[in-house]
Image: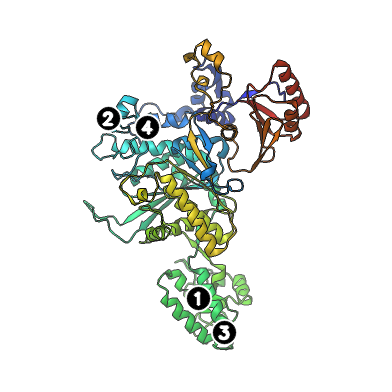
Amino acid sequence: MDNWNMGKMKMESQDMTDYNITLLESIFPDCITECIGEDGNPRRAVAMEKLMRKFSHVVLAGDESYDFTWVGKKAAMLEANRPTGKTLRPVMEESKNWDNTENLYIKGNNLEVLKLLQAGYLGAVRLIYIDPPYNTGHDFVYPDSFMMDREEYAGATGYFDEEGNVNFARENSEAAGRYHSDWCSMLYARLLLARNLLADDGLILINMDEHEIANLQKICGEVFGESNDLGTIIWDKRNPKGDARGISCQHEYIVAYAKNRAVFTEHCTMRRPKKNAEAMLKKAEQLFAKVGQEYSLEEANDAFSAWIQSKKELSGGERAYNRIDQEGNVYRAVSMAWPNRKKAPDEYFIPLIHPVTGKPCPVPERGWRNPPATMKKMMSEGRILFGRDETTIPNSKYLLKDNRYENIPSLLYFGGSDTEMLARMNIPFDTPKVVSICKEHIRSFTGAGDIILDFFSGSATVAHAVMEANAQDQAGRRYIMVQIPEPIPEKTEAYRQGYRDICQIGMERIRRAGEKIQEETGAEIDYGFRVLRVDESNRKDVYYSAGDYTQDLLSMLVSNVKEDRTDLDLLFGCLTDWGVALSYPYHSWKIGDCMVHDYHNGDLVACFAENLTEDAARAIAEKKPRRVVLRDACFADSTAKINIMELLGRLTPKTKIKVI
């Protein structure tokens, strides 16, 4: 590659319109053309007439169609595609194990964060697990200025206070004209961006109550496609709401959609671990160890059955596994009768011979479930249960150790909460998600090294659940938590404890939960997290509005980087711009007066020194990096620039180089 063709870092998130054009070009390259953009430069565009001819008679004419719409929907869609000039700045002092962790905690409006993650995490997330505002009229709806112009936005809805700051205490009253529309726009824009981050075999889980469930399902059907609907879990919380004006709801919902259902079902069986299987197997092991010493096998079975009956938390399916065999295996009897109403083929009626009496046993009325060859194999493997004599129809033998998983049901019965647990941890937070339920879904749908994203993080329950799941199965999952720093009201317990925004509560909860898990399990997992926060661009405003600056002022701007920005700020800004994941390790070293940063073993090497020396350039080139970022004004003069660029071009010709 010719290193003289250095590009400039855009310092903004990926343009999703341009990304969509790239996707379209891969299918219909002849429908992509060029036009002159708003900046006067050529840019790619879609030749709509050509594209429409591809679909001929199925193109919709007119407005009459099946559609779900609301005031502000088009604006939300446009905003999702519009890039942001914001950046992510590291906050090392609030992080835990910054250098080695692979987890992220990002403070800021999740709409901006989702845009900033597009390039680096496109198709990388296995599970998105969110609990967005339920729009009860009292919970917080995110302040998205794209919903209307600033004057209408501020004056009519109270999104901003008298000083122009976001009014986090605003209520979204049912009497408001845009009560449902604001909520739909808020979630729609975010889901459009979130879908891009999902892997092809990924899925999203969304908690919701009765206030917006109908709208949520319609939005998800549009964003993810109705064919990718995996179903909705009805969560019976065992406690009817006391403020109901109609039928009192005691249930909520967990909506599940896949990115691509066909790919998802190839990699996931939609099954979950039986919640109590491990405890049952452990109890059986303890009792069987005493057989021949304190117990006979029959006495061990009586003790095991009594223990099973005493455990109220066991499901009906788990209770059926109430016997221990001669090998110490926990098992249950399952009918081998032909399952269909229609009679089985004749060979399915061959009787089994009782192993003790030597006489044929009865055959089920409609025949056996399995053909003779399978029945013979089951006999040889000891997987058929006979009665005391030949008068009982035999059953098949299901071992619990081979059936530790069960289908995920559409009904979830759980009336508890984690309020008491958080109180013991001294974490003040109302209505947190339930860790055990989050963990169950995380273990069911994710595996080794997967990324779990929650962009309505709240008290960081999902991060807590990821750590518990990793401690249990050592799968090394990673999380990305995103939360807007919503201020804590003064007259609250959290404020009295010193917390000033929800992010502080979430981060402290992760720290304490990690300590608790490590103390209880001793598991060597990743308990850390890198903290990043959304901020304005690292570049001075001249980059965006040059027309506002006079020639005299321009001559004074020796650097185009804001004075308060550190090398680490610039490095992470470059990572989001160039699409590199934010959780990799890096190291920095000095060559003379030049600080050089090597991110992820040469994935990106940066030097932001204002006077780049040949020694520093040579050290960079010796790394043979994939990408290099330099400061635009890093060369002492034109001669130095020529020498350094020739050096880089000769020593590392395949490296991509950009400047800020």
Dot 2 or dot 3, earlier in sequence: 2
User: Amino acid type of disc 2?
Assistant: Ala
Q: CA distance from mark 4 to mark 2?
A: 19 Å
Q: CA distance from mark 1 to mark 2?
A: 67 Å
Q: Position of residue 521 (x, y in %)?
A: 55, 64
Q: CA distance from mark 3 to mark 1?
A: 24 Å
User: Amino acid type of disc 4?
Assistant: Lys
**Secondary element at tag 3:** loop
Q: CA distance from mark 4 to mark 1?
A: 56 Å
Q: Quadrant of residue 32?
A: top right
Q: Nearer the viewer, mark 4 or mark 1?
A: 4
When the figure is inspected, residue 297 is found, relative to residue 101, above or below; the finding is below
Residue furthest toward the right? Answer: 650
Q: Are marks 4 and 3 in contact (CB under 8 Å)?
A: no
Identity of the residue drawn at 28% across and 58% down: 240
Identity of the residue drawn at 50% across and 11% down: 550
User: Amino acid type of disc 1?
Assistant: Ala
Residue placed under numbered mark 1 in the picture = 333
Dot 4 or dot 1, earlier in sequence: 4
Residue placed under numbered mark 4 in the picture = 73
User: Amino acid type of disc 3?
Assistant: Lys
Q: Position of residue 61 (x, y in %)?
A: 39, 26
Name the disc covering residue 156, or none: 2
Q: CA distance from mark 2 to mark 3?
A: 75 Å
Picture quarter with the C terminus: top right
Residue furthest toward the left? Answer: 245
Q: How many marks?
A: 4
**Secondary element at tag 2:** helix
Q: CA distance from mark 4 to mark 3?
A: 68 Å
Judge by depth and name the residue closer to the eye, 385 or 254.
254
Residue placed under numbered mark 3 in the picture = 290
